Amino acid sequence: MSSGSVVTRFAPSPTGYLHLGNARTALLNFLAARKAGGRFILRVEDTDEARSTEAFMHSLFGDLRWLGLDWDEGPDIGGPHGAYRQAERGAIYEEWLGKLAAADLTYPCFCTPAELAISRKQQLASGKPPRYAGTCRALSAAERAERLARGQAAALRFRVPAGRTVAFDDIVHGEQRFQTDGIGDFIIRRTDGSTAFFFSNALDDALMGVNLVLRGDDHMTNTPRQILILEALDLPIPRYAHVALLLGMDGAPLSKRHGALSLHDLRERGYLPEAVCNHLVRLGHTCVTDGWLDREAMLKDFDLQRLGRAAAKFDEAQLRHWQKEGVAQLSREAFRAWTAAQLPQGIDEERLASFLEAVRPNVEFPDDVARWAQVVFGTELEIAPEARAAIREAGTSFFACAREVFARGGADFKQIVREVGRACGEKGPALFMPLRAALTGATHGPELAPLLALIASDEVSRRLDRAEQIAK
């Protein structure tokens, strides 16, 4: 494809929150289109009326925009190929189904789910791959008419030609070849009148000018069916790129036991969209750059030829790495805005700015700021179990000595600590660890000196008193 001619699409079903695997698919399609100066289309496949909802559809829009994606055509902005919701394209589907019927490439199927299940079991038992046995294919026109007149429910099947090979060159997996004798006639319209994925998905791609279909490799076996439909309708066939599915670190398909699975979950937890993108673009795609990628660098780095065949594994530890990188990339103003909801009220701006500067290296999520704000500005200090252990190990005399030195004041923190060390006969971890535990309730955290510069002196004294009591 020439630069500027690439047209991709993302076609989710609004039956739940946007899953991480689908979010990655959206990002890769977006990058493929934008890299080539082409078009990116958003299409909503909402033919499942029982599960599709308006709320989930608008949630999809919000999640994609949060991720930093925009689209050139879609349900919310329109475009020359509308409608962009499959629920509104029924008349279009009927028109093209009529063309298949006129060419005698479809027929009604009256088999019930129970009959189909029995047929599959029999085929498996005899060592054959399960496929439609063609039970209704040979019915005469009179037999079909009689069954329809009796009101018998019928799906519509596509006649798969016998003895053919369907071949296509997949960008990721190379040449793929499928024998039509192993496919079997497949349903393109269900008994309830809704069109099946094989038909509507392929038809919409062709009518909307999509020429690059980038999707998960679980769709690989759907592709020959869709090619057959497009050939039968004399419609253009896109190029295909089937990327490896997203798995958990244990190699199993992603499930709730692997942690946050939707963009909704990640947003709720405070992840930055840029961090999510930096992780997703490396799942099933090899980046040349190991470090942080802003949007411009991500577009420059993206290459269809580096989409991988091996299963991609979602690792939240890696996502948290990119979250830390993302926080480090924020400007002071952006960091302040990101954490604004967690900042205490009634604190002067200079103290707040000093506080944010002090805790920023230890912040991954906005909630971390709330925790350190309680340490610095609060009076109810929660002491972690490991901090209590450090306090008890230091003993009462250590904190009595420390309280006396701190009470004198008049010097910076480092000087005070040196005086505590001399008075108590301690140095290194034996000096710093119990002080940190007593004054912050934790054994790890931001540099102690700038934190203590913000804590009121009477609160410091009170915390040392409390530590002395704990050490008894």
Image (tube, rainbow, N blue to C red):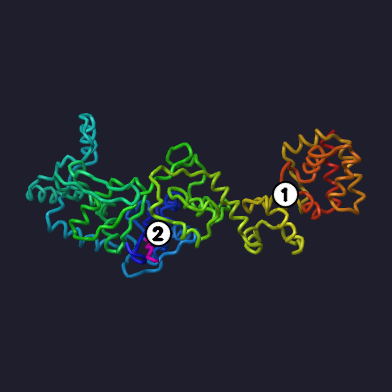
Q: As rendered, which of 346 and 434 lies closer to the eye?
A: 434
Q: Amino acid under label 1?
A: Pro
| Residue 471, quarter of picture | top right
- Identify the residue under disc 2: 32
- Foreground pick, 294 / 465: 294
- Residue 421, position as x, y percentages in the image: 87, 41
Q: Indicate whether residue 39 is drawn in magenta.
A: yes
Q: Is residue 186 left or right of residue 295?
A: left
Q: Residue furthest front?
A: 288
Circle 1 Cα neighbour tier, 10 Å, few/some/many (<14 / 14–19 / ≥20): some
Residue 364 lies in the magenta-colored region: no
Picture layout, residue 93 above or below residue 245? below
Q: CA distance from mark 2 to mark 1?
A: 41 Å
Segment colored magenta: 37-42
| Quarter of the figure that contains the N terminus | bottom left
Give the labeled residue for mark 1.
446
For the C terminus, the image quarter is top right
Looking at marks 2 and 1 on the same chain, the residue that comes earlier in the sequence is marked by 2
| Residue 313 numbered mark, or none | none
Q: What amino acid is found at the position of numbered circle 2 in the picture?
A: Ala
Looking at the rendered structure, the secondary structure element under dot 2 is helix
